[in-house]
Amino acid sequence: MPGLNEGAALRLAEPIVPQIINRLRQAIIELKLEPGQPLSEKEIALLYGVSRQPVREAFIKLAEAGLVQVLPSRGTYVTKISVKSVLNARFVREAIECAVVREAALRIDAAGLDQLAALIDAQERAAETFNNVAFTELDEAFHRAIADCLDCDYATRVVEAARTQTDRVRHLSLPEASPFPVLIQQHRAIVAALCQREPQAAEEAMRRHVREILSAIPRLAAEHPAYFEDQASLADL
């Protein structure tokens, strides 16, 4: 199946369904499985050397996450990118991450700051080789590290659930619509505010960073109209 040609074997000693979910989810987020693309239960089962039942269960979970659409008698398809869902997810991220970084400015320690600086350095190396996957993984690690310094795992889980709706846009936007240097500079501004123990500055820097996606969506929807649905929601920007 196009987009799933790695052929890496599943780890049979571990639960099968979560592995299939993770592989399909990653392929969808990285746009290896394109919005609107049909998914074959039979082909995926053959690819991973399993029965169709665990693939069917994976489809159900991915449908609950809004990544696939199961249409009775018609098949299963990768969900198109919903502009409305992306905007709603961005709103949730902004509310939580701005609150988290504001508190982090008062509580983060030297080790936490060193970790953030190291993650930015790693992002710069990923940018030099145009490694979108590594860059976005490091971006996730950066935001997670800020929440971790507050021991706030619930906030992390909520944000990561919201990112499910925004991650495909992020992958689609890199590096043209959202240049690597711009995103790295935004991360440096966040860390600078944290170093200075300035909650308001940290919040403002995070808000600018999280809102970066707003400027990218209209252009991406125009360039890839087949990937998006409910484009009327762009009027809300």
Image (cartoon, helix red, strand yellow):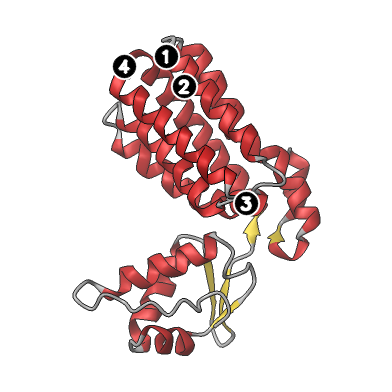
| Residue located beneath label 2 in the image | 191
Q: Is residue 74 left or right of residue 43?
A: right
Cα distance between the residues tagged 1 and 4? 11 Å
Nearer to me, 67 or 181:
181
Which callout, 3 or 2, points at the residue further toward the start of the chain? 3
Q: Residues within 10 Å of mark 3 (few under 14, many from 20)?
A: many
What's the residue type where badge 1 is placed?
A: Cys
As drawn, 137 above or below 64: above
Which callout, 1 or 4, points at the residue further toward the start of the chain? 4
Cα distance between the residues tagged 3 and 1? 30 Å
Cα distance between the residues tagged 4 and 3? 32 Å
**Which residue: 26% across, 75% down?**
11
| Residue located beneath label 1 in the image | 195
| Residue located beneath label 4 in the image | 107
**Which residue: 48% across, 25% down?**
98
Task: Specify the quadrant that holds the N terminus.
Answer: bottom right
* Residue 185: image location, x then y, percent: 59, 27
Cα distance between the residues tagged 2 and 1? 6 Å
| Residue located beneath label 3 in the image | 169
Task: Specify the quadrant that holds the C terminus.
Answer: top right
Q: Are marks 2 and 1 in contact (CB under 8 Å)?
A: yes
Nearer to me, 7 or 73:
7
Of circles 3 and 2, the one toward us is 2
Secondary structure of the residue carrying tag 2 is: helix
Nearer to me, 114 or 96:
114
Q: Are marks 2 and 4 in contact (CB under 8 Å)?
A: no
Of circles 1 and 4, the one toward us is 1
**Which residue: 70% across, 60% down?**
229
In the rendered structure, find residue 48 and report the number of the disc placed on it. none
What's the residue type where badge 2 is placed?
A: Val
Which callout, 3 or 1, points at the residue further toward the start of the chain? 3
